[in-house]
Image (cartoon, grey):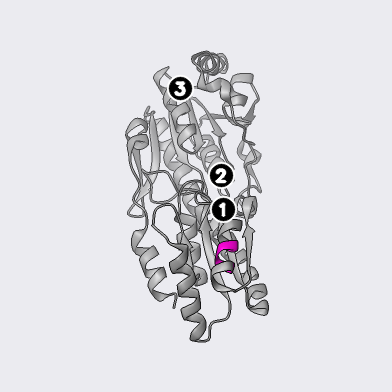
Amino acid sequence: MIKTIGVLTSGGDAPGMNAAVRAVARTAISRGIKVYGIRRGYNGLINGDIIEMNERSVSDILQKGGTCLYTARCPEFRTAEGVDKAVAKCKEIGLEGIVVIGGDGSFRGAADLSAKGILCIGLPGTIDNDIACTEYTIGYDTAMNTALEMVDKIRDTAQSHDRCSVVEVMGRNAGYIAVNTGIACGATEIITKEMPYDLDEVAKKMLETRKTGKQHFIIVVAEGVGHSQEIAQTLQEKTGIEARATILGHVQRGGSPTLRDRVIASLMGNYAVDLLTQGIGNRVVGMQNNKIVDFDIQEALSMQKPYETHTHEVAREIAI
């Protein structure tokens, strides 16, 4: 049976990562497995920034955003020499398996370690929800709720001044946060890379709805599209309606995780330790049909995730 494991968070932080770390640590400890917390991702693994954890090491972190293990980029780990250094450190302290909480880049690193004999399990931790093998990623729900709260506040000002507010949300190259925030806040238009859009048509829609009595407008733009200031300026020129752009930015990555993020992170963390105790590695944990499942890392990385086209179409139809 596996005796010693590590847990790390890598890439961008996401609300709920702490819940996953907590679940990994306490599941392992309850089964008599020694747990090390690896700080600052793969950088910490290479450089030995590692601490032994006990059941109290993860007390009172469930409700906190960010990651108690910190996170960092590690260009060195992308090299063969860097991977070898990490493997050597694992052997030095007796690490037999590692739970890696992060995104696609983190999983590629986990695959490299698995190929060298270190059992690795990836947990999908990113607000972007852009990991193809899973319907849901840790941090996604909190980020959407944060974005929605911010848009609702911006709407108050837009309504007071009869303005159009162009709000850019995060999501990297994926439009999942944008489309769900957009339908939830009643946006006049949602602009993402996945769906074609025409600013002439958006302007036309704004003018048509103004004839029915609507005086303020919300346009939600995905980070992957960007150019929110230019979009606002273009819409103002085409409609004569004052338009302002707001980029929400990293506020969406912080904050106390929602119930959904805490529960799913906890279930995924527990599942990851289940796999390791069976001697299983080179897997990514995900959610399909609301059930926790796992995939081979290479299979997971090769998958393509469908966009929520129907949700986008519904949002457009009811924004009149």
**Location of residue 251 in the rendering, given as x and y in whole percent from the top left corner:** 65, 54
Q: Residues within 10 Å of mark 3 (few under 14, many from 20)?
A: many
Instruction: Check disc 1 and give the amino acid type.
Output: His
Instruction: Check disc 2 and give the amino acid type.
Output: Met
The reply to whether discs 3 and 2 touch (Cβ–Cβ < 8 Å) is no
**Location of residue 84 in the rendering, given as x and y in whole percent from the top left corner:** 51, 14
> Pointer 1: what residue?
227
Q: In the image, is residue 129 above or below residue 285?
A: below
Report the Cα–Cα distance between label 2 and label 1.
31 Å
> Pointer 3: what residue?
113
Q: Secondary structure at mark 2?
A: helix
Q: Residue at x 65, y 70 (%)?
A: 153
**Location of residue 140 in the rendering, given as x and y in whole percent from the top left corner:** 50, 53
The region drawn magenta spans 232-236
Dominant SS in magenta: helix
> Pointer 2: what residue?
17
